[in-house]
Image: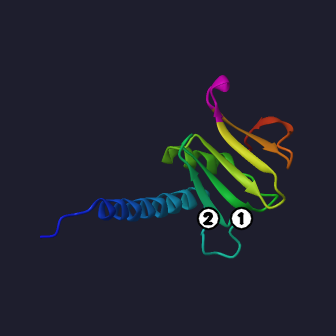
């Protein structure tokens, strides 16, 4: 029986990570009511930020915003923050606000990373 090399272990981990990313991407899509293969999907890609345990949706339509119901689905999976990177270059940041009984909040930043308006509660 051949000895497993460090390279073998590395590539096995990469395959397992890719499978886990695909599975969690599908869970997120289900929580949001998305179908990644649908041409009308409001986002084109998803990325994960390990440093703060968040995810980012890329290529999001400018007028798209998460609803409270969608955010609830995201929270049930275990995320407490996410970013929507809109086509126009602005970003929407969704998070649980510990100062407000962990109510979900959203703030939007423009291209210069200046907050547009004030952080607000999510619509129902």
Which percent across, then down, holds residue 79? 54, 44
Q: Residue 61 occupies which quadrant of the picture?
A: bottom right
Using the image, determine if residue 7 lies above or below residue 78: below
What colouring method underlies this structural image?
A: rainbow
Q: What residue did someone put label 2 on?
A: 34
Q: What residue did someone put label 1 on?
A: 42
Kind of element beneath mark 1: loop
Residues under numbered marks 2 and 1 in contact, where contact means CB atoms less than 8 Å apart: yes
Q: State the CA–CA distance, disc 2 to disc 1.
A: 8 Å
Kind of element beneath mark 2: loop
Task: Residue 97: say if magenta.
Answer: yes
Residue drawn 71% across the image and 52% down it: 84
Residue drawn 50% across the image and 45% down it: 76
In this view of the protein, can residue 41 be seen by the observer?
Answer: yes
In the displayed orientation, state which residue is furthest to the left: 1
Q: Is residue 32 left or right of residue 15?
A: right
Which percent across, then down, holds residue 114? 85, 40
Task: Mark 1: give few (<14), some (14-19) or many (20+) Cα within 10 Å.
Answer: many
Q: Is residue 43 left or right of residue 72?
A: right
Residue drawn 69% across the image and 64% down it: 43
Q: Residue 52 occupies which quadrant of the picture?
A: top right
Which percent across, then down, holds residue 103? 65, 33
Which percent across, then down, holds residue 72? 58, 45
**Mark sitting earlier along the chain (2/1):** 2
Split into 4 quadrants, where in the image is the C terminus? top right
Split into 4 quadrants, where in the image is the N terminus? bottom left
Q: What's the magenta region?
A: 96-102
In this view of the protein, can residue 124 be seen by the observer?
Answer: no
Task: Residue 7: say if magenta.
Answer: no
């Amino acid at each position: 029986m051949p000895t497993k090399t460090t390279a073998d272990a590395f590539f096995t981990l990469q395959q397992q990570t890719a499978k886990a990313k695909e599975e969690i991407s599908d869970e997120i899509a289900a929580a949001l009511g998305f179908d990644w293969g649908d041409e009308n999907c409001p986002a084109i890609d998803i990325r994960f930020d390990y440093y703060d345990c968040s995810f980012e949706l890329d290529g999001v339509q400018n007028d798209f915003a998460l609803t409270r119901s969608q955010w609830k689905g995201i929270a049930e999976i275990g995320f407490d923050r996410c970013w929507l990177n809109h086509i126009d270059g602005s970003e929407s940041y969704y998070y649980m606000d510990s100062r407000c009984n962990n109510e979900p909040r959203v703030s939007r930043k423009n291209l210069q990373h200046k907050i547009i308006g004030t952080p607000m509660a999510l619509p129902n």
